[in-house]
Amino acid sequence: MLDPFPVNSVGLVAPQSLVIDTEISLESGKKLQSYEIAYETYGQLNADKSNAILVCHALSGHQHAAGYHTREDKKAGWWETCIGPDKPIDTNHFFVVCPNNIGGCHGSSGPSSINPKNNRLYGPDFPVVTVKDWVKSQAQISDALGIDQWLAVVGGSLGGMQALQWAIDYPDRLKYSVALAAAPKLSAQNIAFNEVARQAIMSDPDFFDGHYAEHDKTPRQGLMLARMLGHITYLSDDMMRDKFGRELREGKLNFGFDVDFQVESYLRYQGRSFVDKFDANTYLLMTKALDYFDPAADYNDSLISTFQQARAKFFIASFSSDWRFPPERSREIANALLYAGKEVTYAEFEVAEGHDAFLLPIEKYINTFHAYMKRIASESELI
Amino acid sequence: MSNLRLDQQQLVNWIKPNSKVLDLGCGNGELLAYLAKHKQVQGYGLEIDDANVVSCIEKGVNVIQRDIDAGLSEFEKDFFDYVILSQTIQAVRSPEKTLSEMLRVGCKGIVTLPNLGHWRIRMQMGLGGKTPLTAEFPHSWYDTPNIHVCTIDDFENFCQNKNVKIVRKKAFGSSHKSGLLIDTFPNVFATTAVYKLCRNCPDEKPE
């Protein structure tokens, strides 16, 4: 039990929800008549609504970015390291909104929610959504919350891609775009990993073409494998070596196919605990959204033209050991922004932690990110 | 102006308002912050050190965290009006490559350098027999970042050999004093020199 909560935590928070009744047309051509959004907020919105920050979540993320839901919670929200009083996204100055994206499985409309048209679970019939669709729905959420312009849209990985898409699609509705450990589009290797993850899920006998809920089943094995695979790509080789090396779980080889090495036990644990809190159809959707992300495709494949109409200032950052979205990918973004004549700051951190580094309390990263967020606050006269 | 180093105070006079500037090894961003405020330049800094990057961000300077030695190949030809290398040429791995790259991505280059030919250094070397320690060369031989030090004459010969045109230059002593001795024998009496360079600029006559 955590009482009191750490001083630099937003503390006890409650999930909220709202219903968007405005129809949304998706990139696929499909439409949602209405949808529900689960979200959380931290800090206070000021009188002129000029301090609102939108935090976008990544592949397996959700609206619970910071704080604790109950006093008994052992773990805080997924970005507790960066959101809270005196942290980079400082809730002393900023009002933070983090929604669960549509297609998600933490309260927003998605495969595991009820389709109002037929009162049955959407399941695999929930339309495939894209980063562009998410940004469009987040704009509708902004309208519903009465926020005309975000001070900043911030995210890491897939969340960073949303922050970039915001600057492209709604240039007047944000002043800063912050994209950490992102990429301008996925590489063939990235897509390949996502495809193996999807195949793992879809080939599970309990998948039933996505209708597993109707059969009272979950494709546990498939989702677990998908997560194990994903997890390998989030860590770096160095970090795995440091953390596990070739350490044996029972101190000896068993000459069988059960767990010998610590790393196997760790991955199985990660996979198993993920299955209990994530929906397989959502995992399929999220990986597709990643694969489809390619904002330059609408602009003759020129990233420079893509950013031409953006009006935000940008903070782009990458991590040296991230092999999922390595620094070169972020440099592509930073260079394109520079040639498009935009204000851009680019930081590259020498760290061992791999792709997940953006979630971790790494001093040099936190210091630089904090400095940039302070720049945002001071240029907007919040401090 | 007070936060700028003497060489920076000199070079800002050579930069036209509203131009695009790249400062290589921009340090804490002081120069770019000054240029943004007083000359409305669109400036970007290249800097590798984490603490300096933070200082740049605090000043609102757009900084790209990158090692100059890793090259400027990602930058397009002639994108910048000016590329500045102030008190940094002595610390890069290949001054030759850096100079040619800066004149590729920028129309004009501005280089400032500490003069190894200054009489005080000659005295310390010639009479004292020791590696010189001066305000411009404050590091001991074993911990210096300066791996390519040169004299004013060395640098000017180098530019001539590489077909780099020096369109302006200014040499001065440690307290920014110029005078007859410095103007006549800069290689002996100047501690610092500032150069404005270009690759092929028929319109620019040496001033």
Image (spheres, coloured by chain):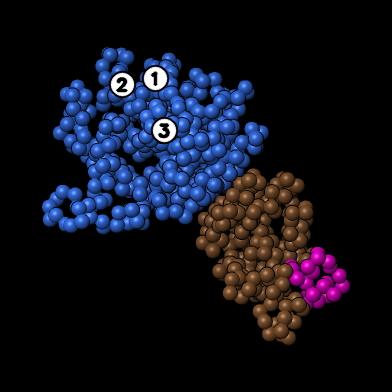
Chain colours: A blue, B brown
Q: Which residues are magenta?
A: B172-193
Instruction: Tell me which amino acid carries mark 1.
Output: Glu
Q: Residues within 10 Å of mark 3 (few under 14, many from 20)?
A: few
Check if mark 3 and mark 1 are on a common chain: yes
Instruction: Tell me which amino acid carries mark 3.
Output: Leu
Q: Is residue A134 covered in magenta?
A: no
The chain under label 1 reads: A
Residue at 46% from the left image edge and 40% from the top image edge: A81
N-term-proximal mark, 2 vs 3: 3
Choose top left, top right, bottom left or bottom right for residue A133.
top left
Q: Which residue is mark 2?
A: A113
Q: Is residue A202 left or right of residue A353?
A: left
Question: Could you tell me residue A25's position as x and y percent?
Answer: 40, 22
Q: Is residue B182 covered in magenta?
A: yes
Residue at 66% from the left image edge and 33% from the top image edge: A381
Question: Could you tell me residue A328's position as x and y percent?
Answer: 45, 52
N-term-proximal mark, 3 vs 1: 3
Q: Residues within 10 Å of mark 1 (few under 14, many from 20)?
A: some
Q: Is residue A99 left or right of residue B54?
A: left
Q: Which residue is mark 1?
A: A36
Measure how far apart labels 3 and 1 are at the Cα level: 31 Å
Q: Is residue A246 above or below residue A145?
A: below
Question: Could one spot residue B16 in this view of the protein?
Answer: yes
Pointers 3 and 1 in contact (C-beta within 8 Å): no
Q: Secondary structure at mark 2?
A: loop
Question: Could you tell me residue A75's position as x and y percent?
Answer: 38, 35
Residue at 54% from the left image edge and 56% from the top image edge: B66
Measure how far apart labels 2 and 3 are at the Cα level: 32 Å
Q: Which residue is mark 3?
A: A2
